[in-house]
Amino acid sequence: MEEDIQKKLVSLCNLLPVHVDLWKTILQSLQSPVKALGNFAEQLQFVEKATNTYMDDFEELQRQLGTKILENIEEELQAIKTLMETLDKSNHNLKNKLAILEKSTIDLDWDNDSFITKGTPIQPPLRQILQMAYEFWLYFSRASKTINSELKNINFRDEKSMEQLQNAFSLSLEVHNNREVYGILALTQYVVNEKAVT
């Protein structure tokens, strides 16, 4: 049973840095459409506030320009949503691996003095890994929910709403700023082979 748990633990530990790297890559890719979205929203606000009394067809031009800007906003939103789907799938995959590992420990004797329960010099105790892995998943799950919530409730005509959206994408994944993410990566970096600790 412990060999099976170790195998699942290794699978989870191997996924952790991949998950962080994916988030970094996607967040980098999201910078361009998020910035463009902000620019288009600002343009829309200016166009809708503009007034002109000396041009006969001004209102028609204003409407056409507003429509074109809204189309551009829709394109950027679609690009953002597509990238967010990738992050959501990765979060789901991480949650599944964590759940599989947790389920495999149902019959584990936690009082047993084994390398799984007590840990080794290169592998922390399973209880600690499970707790930290849950916090790791929770960090990314909350970030994803915040971003998706801001996307769902966005108001392009409101500067504060646009600012909140941009702030939702300002996720710090740097080592010195994020204990939830890098704590578990540091502790599990050597848990890469199910035979390494037995």
Image: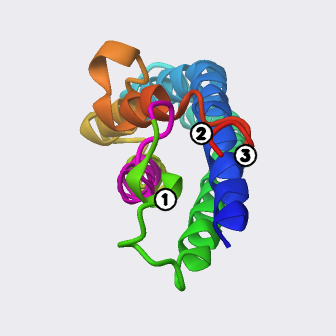
What kind of secondary structure does the magenta stretch mostly adopt? helix
Residue 16 covered by magenta stretch = no
Q: Could you tell me if residue 89 is visible in this image?
A: no
Picture coordinates of residue 64, whole percent (x, y) = 67, 36
Determine crowd level at label 2: few under 14, some 14-19, many 20+ residues with C-alpha closer than 10 A: many
* Mark 1 residue element: loop
The quadrant in which the N terminus is found is bottom right
Mark 3 near mark 1, Cβ–Cβ under 8 Å?
no
Picture coordinates of residue 92, whole percent (x, y) = 64, 61
Residue 16: numbered disc: 2
Q: For mark 1, what is the residue?
A: 114
Report the Cα–Cα distance between label 3 and label 1: 14 Å
Lower sequence index among marks 3 and 1: 1
Q: Is residue 53 above or below residue 93?
A: above
Q: Is residue 86 above or below residue 170?
A: below
Q: Quadrant of residue 153?
A: bottom left
Closest to the camera, between mark 3 and mark 1, is: 1
* Relative horizontal placement of residue 198, taking residue 46 as reference (left or right): right
Q: Quadrant of residue 110?
A: bottom left
Q: Could you tell me if residue 86 is visible in this image?
A: yes
Q: Amino acid at mark 3?
A: Glu
- The stretch of residues the image draws in magenta is 121-137
Q: For mark 3, what is the residue?
A: 194
Of 156 and 84, the residue lying toward us: 84
Residue farthest to the left, as pictured: 160
Q: Is residue 25 above or below residue 181?
A: above
Lower sequence index among marks 3 and 2: 2
